Image (cartoon, helix red, strand yellow):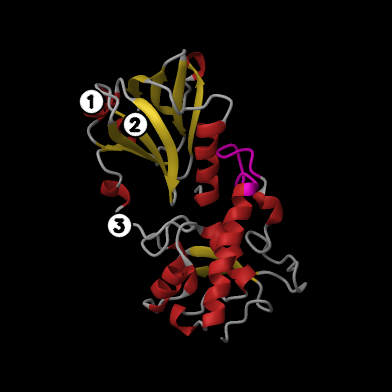
Amino acid sequence: MPELPEVETVARMLREGALPLVGRTIRSAEVLWPREVASPTPRTFARRIAGSRVQSVGRYGKYLLIGLSSASDGADGLSLLVHLRMSGRLEVVSCSAAFTPHARLVWLLDDDLALRFEDARKFGRVWLVDDPAEVIGKLGPDALAITLEEFVLRLRTRRGTLKPLLLDQTFIAGIGNIYADEALHLARLHPLRTADSLSEDEALRLYAAIRQVLLEGIAANGASFDWVYPGGRFQENFKVYGRTGQRCPTCDSPIRRITVTQRSTHFCPACQPLAG
């Protein structure tokens, strides 16, 4: 599932790519898989979005946020939110390339272009709302926007183990399995350490590590494993994730894999001792 760096890379491509989305007018929307539209109904979705102009493309956590102007007067209007989930791909293409076998939604744009949402596994979701808080209001702060002070304060109110806490989107939004493992290794913290056991220095290390691995991930265009999300290079820099039995680049000890709340978790037992 794409995490913050992968989603940020998609947002950047929609803003700055060869066929930027910002400034385009949405002439109409074709809902090819109705369940992909979480809200409103597919018919209302298509009706309300027609004629809107794309004003902005951003991100919050793992969500893409596309700001739209009103079709009638150009004032700020609706927000289009997209969660890519397991296999979603969102890109601007020519109209002739829009309707592929895995296309679930297609927005027909001006200049004979289209915004195509492909989703082979059909887990992705799209919302059209008046206020993004209707969808993302229950999430914690974005992982790249949260301040050190807020991070430490939120950490002090939790007693759970670190790995599940970092994956909890209501605690901090945007981190998934890959970047949680990499951040914990960089911070030299065992994934089963409890949040309330961290010293002030350890909390600072974790905050800094989260920012570093996320920013490095963005600089590398995210991580790529297969056809679903091509073009990323961060997998070339993994220190622990997916490296079970291989040598830790820091201390040469073998990387271990355990299961934490049903998620594969990779760590170095020498660099990341369980004892605080």
Instruction: Please report whichever mark, 3 or 1, sits nearer to the chain's N-terminal start.
Output: 1
**Does the magenta portion include 51?**
no
- Other residues around mark 1 within 10 Å, as few (<14) / some (14–19) / many (≥20): few
Count of numbered circles on the image: 3
Which residue corresponds to the image point at 28% horizontal and 49% vertical from the top-left?
133
Structural distance between the alpha carbons of marks 2 and 3: 22 Å
Please report the bounds of the magenta region as a residue range: 219-232
Give the numbered dot on residue 138. Answer: 3
Q: In front: mark 1 or mark 2? A: 2
With respect to residue 148, does 34 lie above or below? above
Instruction: Please report whichever mark, 1 or 2, sits nearer to the chain's N-terminal start.
Output: 1
Give the numbered dot on residue 68. Answer: 2
Structural distance between the alpha carbons of marks 1 and 2: 18 Å
Toward the bottom, the furthest residue is 275
Q: Amino acid at mark 1?
A: Arg
Q: Nearer the viewer, residue 55 or 271?
A: 55
**Horizontal side, residue 120 vs residue 81: left or right:** right
Disc 1 designates what residue?
Answer: 43
Q: Quadrant of residue 142?
A: bottom left
Q: Amino acid at mark 2?
A: Leu
Residue 38 shows up from this direction: no
Location of residue 6 in the rendering, given as x and y in whole percent from the top left corner: 54, 45
Q: In front: mark 3 or mark 1? A: 3
Q: Main secondary structure of the magenta part?
A: loop
Q: Which element carries disc 1, helix, strand or loop?
A: helix
With respect to residue 114, does 154 lie above or below? below
Q: Which element carries disc 2, helix, strand or loop?
A: strand
With respect to residue 135, does 75 lie above or below? above
Q: Amino acid at mark 3?
A: Lys
